[in-house]
Amino acid sequence: MNCVRCLLRLQSLGIRSPSVRAALQHPAWLQRSTAPSKITRHNTCSQALRRFHGSAACSKSQPVSTDQEEKDKSLVTYDDLFEKVARDTKTKATFNRVLEVFCKRDIRRRGHIEFIYAALKKMPEFGVERDIAVYNNLLDIFPKEVFVPRNFIQRMFNHYPRQQECGVQLLEQMENYGILPNVESKVLIVQIFGEKSHPMRKFQRIMYWFPKFKHTNPFPVPRHLPEDPVDLARLSLNRIANDLDAKVTVYQTPCTDVSESGEEITFPLVVGIQSPDQMELLAKHNPSRPVFVEGPFPLWLRNTCVYYYVLRAEPLPPKEKVEEPYDPERSFYYPLELDLDLDRDLGEDNSFDVDEVDEGPVFAMCMTSRGDQATLNQWISGLQETNPILGSVPTIFRLDAGPTELQGVSD
């Protein structure tokens, strides 16, 4: 029967040969002929007649766009949205208006992940990077009760990973700026991702560690630095000196004057600090050995960098060093009470392991808005009023190429 079907198919395809006609006229002969060679020939014919059909649309080569390219395009689009809405002023009100425009665009909040990433990047420009209410508004953009896992399998396989990663990134930016989440943040995270999710774990870690490290810094920097350069220099020098007896002196305030020829002359800022101990060291200095004015050295106060200069001397050679007796009331090496623990071995060494670096003494420090030699000469001249020995000590300036102005908050 297989041979008959093969011959009938050949006939339908238009193959008209005498052998085919004879085979069709004598079907009984075809039934009796069941040789293996004919069966093999039938299989070969049926395989030769098979064809593969392809669509013309599939044959055209189309460029495949990656996820990174689509993400970059969407970020550019949302950046344009921020620029269009907040074209004139960039404030908290305009930032919240952009969020409202996005929420009213689509009820399903399509593209909310790319929009939140773009908003996190734009927050410093609008000055809302430390506002907890704005972060809660960003969390409110996520659709509610959609990404909550329904069973342990979904929780185990990281249900909706892109959305959870975006939520963790938002909380990490809050952590970088030192913002503590509130109760509203927790309610939003539970509504969006559930209680067993990565953003909820990040929230719990922040709430655990932030209160512990809130007051650990014994020398905290103010959140808002002073805008006046004199006050900023006074704050910086007091922080460097770390001596309650140190006295800050303003040798010259920044001002502008008009000369007789009509030219404007700008006087730079010169603020210095010196403690009584430093004055005592400078009075004992050998006049034959020079002192050096070195700088500028950077000091970071949050996002503001200021520069200062020091007046110092080279370390004394070993022959000229004189060991002064220690005051037992002011030295940690000679305590008033000595407690011996007899349970310990007397061979144990309980002394401090301190790396001693031989450096010269620092006599004074200053900050100026113009770090040239003429301006620093004014500082040395002002120090001579309280340190007369500077009139007989040679002063050498070793200045590096640095900024010429004291950077303020606005810079």
Image (cartoon, rainbow, N blue to C red):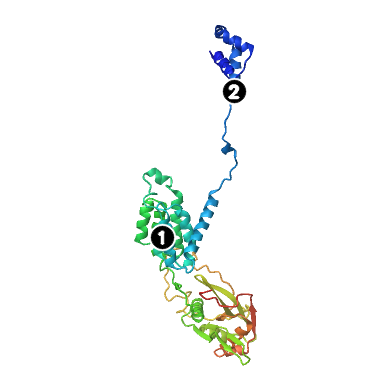
Q: Are marks 1 and 2 in contact (CB under 8 Å)?
A: no
Give the labeled residue for mark 2: 49
Q: Nearer the viewer, residue 101 or 321?
A: 101
Mark 2 Cα shell of 10 Å, populated few (<14), some (14-19), many (≥20): few
- For marks 1 and 2, the one nearer the N-term is 2
From the viewer's perspective, is 399 left or right of 221? Answer: right
Say what amino acid the circle numbered 1 marks.
Answer: Glu
- Could you tell me which secondary element the residue under label 2 belongs to? loop
Checking the image for residue 28, the label placed there is: none
Give the labeled residue for mark 1: 100
Residue 320, by quadrant, is bottom right
Q: Number of marks in the image?
A: 2
- Residue in view at x 46 percent, y 53 percent: 111
Residue 184, by quadrant, is bottom left
Q: Nearer the viewer, residue 363 or 98?
A: 98
**Location of the C terminus (image quadrant):** bottom right
Q: Is residue 290 visible?
A: no
Q: Position of residue 212 (x, y in %)?
A: 39, 64
Say what amino acid the circle numbered 2 marks.
Answer: Leu
Mark 1 Cα shell of 10 Å, populated few (<14), some (14-19), many (≥20): few
Residue 371, by quadrant, is bottom right
Q: Position of residue 39 (x, y in %)?
A: 58, 14
Q: Nearer the viewer, residue 36 or 100?
A: 100
Q: Position of residue 257 (x, y in %)?
A: 57, 88
- Could you tell me which secondary element the residue under label 1 belongs to? helix
Compared with 208, 397 (above or below) is: below
Q: Is residue 22 visible?
A: yes
Q: Residue furthest bottom?
A: 260
Q: Give the spatial CA distance, label 1 vs label 2.
A: 64 Å
